[in-house]
Image (cartoon, rainbow, N blue to C red):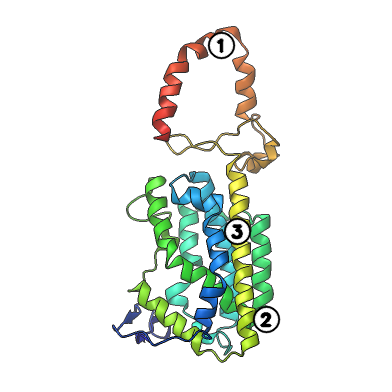
Amino acid sequence: MPSAMEGSEGGEGEIMRYEETEDDSVSPTDLSELLKEGTKESHDRAENTQFVKDFLKGRIKKELFKLATAALYFTYSALEEEMDRNKDNPVFAPLYFPLELHRREALIKDLKYFYGEDWEEKIQCSEATQHYVDRIHHVGQHEPELLVAHAYTRYMGDLSGGQVLKKVAQRALKLPSTEEGIQFYVFDNISNAQQFKQLYRARMNALDLDKNTKERIVEEANRAFKFNMQVFDELDETGKSLTEEAQDGGFPVHDGKGDLRKCPYYADKLGKAGPSCPWHAAVALAKQPLVQLILAACVAVAAGAAAWYVM
């Protein structure tokens, strides 16, 4: 097991560092191995959701990325609240690394970047995310021995595949090289992600758990993957109602289909004074003969611009 200087137990300026050591041998009955093998199928299914596949290909719209960031904020707020609640509980205490792992403050920075200082007034917890949040709170308050399943699923993924998504998002969304908007993926207090994961797994394996509890933890980890997939599917469905943002980063435009209240931007404007959906106004204008002539003349230019945009 790699030895470490644990920043969580020291001052806020300390960064966790590791000595290069050989991995201790693991047993098939170790919790880390049981989780690895027992969640392999769920992990593969999660990676093959349409949302994740599109994300990895760089096909992620800024508005959808903002909604995903909001979902992560609600999820990690719940998870870290329950981790704080159980920080002295023997079934979780060895895995409590707030300085190194906690993501809530990083997500707040991202939300401020995307939504502004009044970000809290502009986001809401989606239905799928709320189910996930409710389960985390139930586990933390009634079955804390299962909390490790949710921590393992989220943080180990963030330190692994999450780092790939960070680069994809930065490139696809043309985010600043200074990492605004992707602070969620930045772990400043972990000097070596691979060695930290080794330490975390070793701590998991040292927990005093019987066979039945380990099996329940694996089952709960699969449930966590299922919650994540439901959030991904929800985001994918939402994404179908969004068109590409304007080149200057403007708001997405409603496509004129379905209920206007489901348009992520205009839903926030319902009940307030202002014009109706731009789509409907555009349709009415397009019916004018002169406008139709102008539109016909611009078809070639518009097609060329669209082709350039998707390249």
Specify the amino acid type for callout 2.
Glu
Q: In this view, does 299 lie above or below 174?
A: above
Q: Quadrant of residue 217?
A: bottom right
Q: In which quarter of the image is residue 20?
A: bottom left
Mark 2 residue element:
loop
Judge left or right: residue 93 versus residue 137. Answer: left
Q: Nearer the viewer, residue 194 or 246?
A: 194
Q: Residues within 10 Å of mark 3 (few under 14, many from 20)?
A: many
Tell me the CA gap for discs 1 and 3.
Answer: 44 Å
Mark 3 residue element:
helix
Q: Nearer the viewer's eye, disc 1 or disc 3?
A: 3
Q: Where is residue 112 in the image (x, y as percent from the top left)?
A: 48, 54
Residue at point 46%, 63% (across, down) = 106
Tell me the CA gap for discs 1 and 2.
Answer: 64 Å
Considering the image in quadrants, where does the N terminus appear? bottom left
Q: Residue furthest front?
A: 28
Is residue 285 at least partly visible in the picture? yes
Specify the amino acid type for callout 3.
Met
Q: Where is residue 89 in the image (x, y as percent from the top left)?
A: 59, 88
CB within 8 Å, label 1 to label 2? no
Residue, disc 1: 292
CB within 8 Å, label 3 to label 2? no
Q: Quadrant of residue 74?
A: bottom right
Residue, disc 2: 143
Is residue 67 at least partly visible in the picture? no
Q: Residues within 10 Å of mark 2 (few under 14, many from 20)?
A: few
Residue at point 34%, 77% (across, down) = 15
Residue at point 46%, 59% (across, down) = 109
Residue, disc 3: 229
